[in-house]
Amino acid sequence: MKHIVLITSGQPTTNPRMVKEADALSAAGYRVTVLHCYWNSWATRADVEMMENKPWQRICIGGDPHNRKVAYFTSKLCFWAAKKLSQRSFKLPIRQYALSRATLPLVRAAKQMPADLYIAHNLAALPAAVAAARAHQAIAGFDAEDYHRHETKSSSFSWEYKLKVMLEDQYIPMLDYISTSSEGIAARYQMHYQRSPMVIRNVLPAVRQCHKNLVHLAAAPIKLFWFSQTIGPNRGLELVIESLRYLQPAKFELHLLGELKTGYTSKLVDLALKNGLKVNKLNFHRPLPADQLFEFCGTFDVGLAPEPAYCQNNDLALSNKLFTYIQSGLAVLLSDTSAQQAFYNEHQQIGKCYQKDDARDLARWIQFYIDHPEELMHTKVSNYKLGQRSLNWETESKLFLNKIKLTLHE
């Protein structure tokens, strides 16, 4: 039985894309191990619950601030030193450890674990996958879910940008395959490295939910839903709040799910009050395990994908929330980023696409669904069927597994 190691600088719960791959590989008969690092407390609790039904193994590397404090703070100290030294000179070999506290412990752990294939699931894990593959004469892959060098507002002259480019230039030529989450990101990596990445969209397993969740009563307020790992800035939520000022308060509810970024709740509340909204129109929900998200998501009417294109990656990426809405049977309101506009052009039946910087345009389409409950119902049912039929992991995983077989020369 061939052994495949998936590597991430975060935790399994915070990386559903990696979890899907681990599940698919295990079901296909591979032995799978996930190497990961501590990220936060809620993900740790969710990881324990999730792993009760998983056939693969996970190993937390680099300690944590609660039970393995020495390893955790040692890794933070090493990261701090690598960052400081690399800011003085990029020529130092220690530069590869300057992106994340997780990189050094992951490199050490991966090199000690023999396997046939190592797959990095973010840039901070890439040095570990390549180092382990070279140590064991194995194969290395990289899932570039994001366009890493431009996943923040940092300019092309910033230290962070230069570090990411340097790491990609160093390690990507050593890879046996690359996958991305959108055609736009694939095009960028093809331009940089003359490689043809495989595109694996951020779809999730098909949902077998009860159709009663697809019903919307005309007299009931329309339920708007947004989720992410973190409720914070640069996610388009400010424009969502601004758009609600143009609607009758009794006609809608807004629900936000995610870990609240410190201080951001008060900013949203202040913005809501500034726009004449009562605080009770904002409903906050704590993060949920992935296997509970669909059921919860299915209780709403419209899924919001308000990406503001604040950086190139945000403009080029297709997030998993978009596909979660479709698969859960929600109508979708999505901003016109490059990736989302292209996707909408292919699937215009999923909802409405609005101008990403125009609160009135977003309000116009929310009002459309308020005024046309029959259209809302039709879109919800259509999206649920689309998710069952094609936009799901059962379909997309076939592409992934075929690539793995080819890569392993099976």
Image: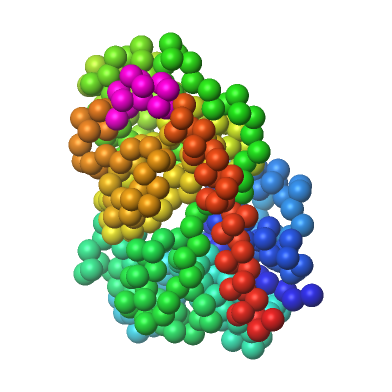
**Residue occupying the far right of the picture:** 1
Residue at x 51% of width, y 72% of height: 142
Image quadrant in which the C terminus is located: bottom right
Task: Give me the residue at 55% from left, 51% from top.
Answer: 390
Residue 253 is situated, as x and y percent measured from the top left of the image, at: 40, 20
Q: Is residue 278 left or right of residue 331?
A: left
Q: Residue at x 25, y 28 (%)?
A: 364
Q: Position of residue 18 (x, y in %)?
A: 58, 59
Judge by depth and name the residue closer to the eye, 178 or 79.
Answer: 178
Q: Nearer the viewer, residue 364 or 163?
A: 364
Which residues fall within the magenta stretch?
Answer: 365-376
Q: Quadrant of the N terminus?
A: bottom right
Tell me the quarter of the picture where residue 214 sits.
top right
Q: Residue at x 33, y 38 (%)?
A: 352
User: Horizontally, is 70 left or right of 57 in the view?
Assistant: left
Q: Residue 132: within the magenta?
A: no
In the rendered picture of this protein, how many numbered marks are placed on residues?
Answer: 0
Q: Is residue 118 above or below residue 25?
A: below
Q: In the figure, residue 194 lies in which quadrant? A: bottom left
Q: Position of residue 366 (x, y in %)?
A: 32, 27
- Percent x, y of residue 103: 52, 69
Task: Give the vertical position of 318 relative to 334 (above or below).
Answer: below
State whether the magenta stretch is mostly helix, strand or loop.
helix
Is 375 magenta? The answer is: yes
